[in-house]
Amino acid sequence: MNLITSPGYSLQGSVTLAGDKSISHRAALFSVLAEGESRIENFPDSGVSQVMLSALSALGVEWELSGSSLRVDGCGLTGLVPINAVINCGNSATALRLLAGVLAVAGIPAVLDGSKSLRRRPMGRIVKPLRAMGVQVEAQQGWLDQDRITAPLRFARRDPGTKLEAINPCLHVASAQVKSCLLLAALAADAPTVIREPAVSRDHTERMLRCMGVEVRSEFLDSEGLQAVTLVPFSSLSLKPLRFSIPGDISSAAFLMVAALITPGSEISVKGVLLNPTRTGLLDALISMGADIGIVPGGEINGEPFGDVTIRHSSLQSVQIFGDQVVSMIDEFPAFSIAAAFAEGDSIVKDAKELRYKESDRISGLCIQLRALGVEVDEVHDGFIIHGGKGVQGGVVDPQGDHRLAMAFSIAGCAAAGPVIVRNAEIIAESYPGFVSTLQSLGGVLTVKGPGDEE
């Protein structure tokens, strides 16, 4: 489908969003390892969440989703039945890497596979440390680069009474997915596991495991300049079931926030949204750019802070993003790039090479499509430079199968000089099925048409 966003209309009102996708992935899957029934409210119904729920079915787990309420019957750490099945992870690297940790701790045979895009994502980051722990896992290796390890991943059976060997890996790239995979595997280790990383990646796994009764410690190693997470297993460990409501998705909120910031006369509020400090890098960046943003904390749910955020149209200034801040806004750079296009001056992003390994090469994709909309942008090996101040002219773009790029270019049309047409925009449903209707409810003018109808 083609999604056409027309400019000239301010955004007004308040919204409450479906639950955060990162937390929902973990809540559904960690419930499998718990003893007893878990109930999770405000569970999102999107393409990526359906991938995880389908994986639970493939594992033989009983679950029920009624509206936004999810019930999962836990199997315990050793209660999963060997299946020897292929589990399709779709386009979700998060699903694959978290499932790898579950297969490692449960010791059951299965194959993890996914889309052509997912098969290109680097998996050596989890395969190598899992093998060091004693997990028998085979992977696809590149013909040209034998060090490049990708899906499908084939896990062999392990006797439930056989412990894994505790390791103390040092991650070269801060990655919540890799860290979470290894923390899950560490539940079956014979001693405490210490994972070190160069920056603080999102910590939903640590917070959730603590609420389930696991001893997990986080600290900064001043002498090494690294972050360390320690998980302590014990032989009689059983995880408590989960009972909580997931805060609103901060990554989905990012597009609404930027849309309001760049569109004259706009003021919107996002209620009950996740405010975990490892996920608020975009908010910090926008505030430093001069954004008029008000935050009212609402407390914590299951260890996760949340609150209300109000955003008003603002004149923005350029900013530089690098180092640790990249990690805290790794999924929000598509939204950030639109804000930067409307900001005065040159906004510079560096230390963000990890963007090349997302659903698409987001550095290249952003630069190519922004140019199609009249934005002046330079691509560099680990980021980009957006020469702001001229806004967006309008035009036709193709997100190349990346849901976040599709939403970013759509909000650009709210304040562009002319309409923005996003081709193949159906990919948005992968993560935010209600995106179009939400923007329309706030006053945005978005039109859905079939291919070839944009003229």
Image (spheres, rainbow, N blue to C red):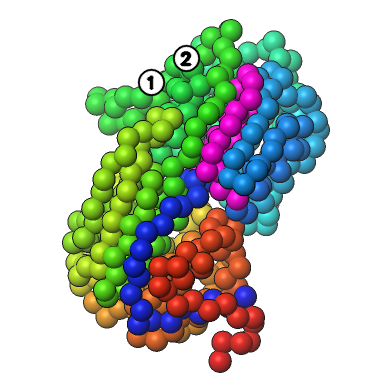
Task: Tell me where residue 199 sits by quadrant.
Answer: top left
Which residue is found at the position 52% from the left and 43% from the top?
A: 42
Q: Is residue 400 above or below residue 203?
A: below
Q: Which residues are magenta?
A: 22-45
Residue 132: where, in percent of width, then height? 58, 24
Q: Nearer the viewer, residue 150 or 335?
A: 335
Horizontal side of residue 85 vs 300, given as left or right: right
How far across and how far down the image is residue 130, in percent?
59, 28
Snapshot quadrant of residue 197: top left
- Looking at the rendered structure, the kind of residue marked 2 is Val
Image quarter of residue 386: bottom left
Q: Is 308 placed above or below 79 here?
A: below
Do the residues bearing badges 1 and 2 touch, measured as CB atoms within 8 Å? yes
Image disc number at residue 427: none
Which residue occupies the foreground of this view, 164 or 446?
A: 446
Q: Residues within 10 Å of mark 2 (few under 14, many from 20)?
A: some
The residue that disc 1 covers is 217
- Is residue 286 within the magenta segment? no
Per the image, label 1 sits on a secondary structure element best described as strand
Say what secondary structure mark 2 lies in: strand
The residue to which callout 2 is attached is 232
Q: Residue at x 80, y 31 (%)?
A: 83
Residue found 74% across the figure and 15% down from its top: 159
Q: Quarter of the image for the N terminus: give it.
A: bottom right
Q: Is residue 181 visible?
A: yes
Cα gap from disc 1 to disc 2, whole angstroms: 9 Å
Residue at 36%, 79% (x, y): give it: 9
The image position of residue 300, as x and y in percent, is: 36, 33
Residue 24 in magenta? Answer: yes
Tally of marks: 2
**Residue 21, position as x, y percentages in the image:** 51, 46
Looking at the rendered structure, the kind of residue marked 1 is Arg
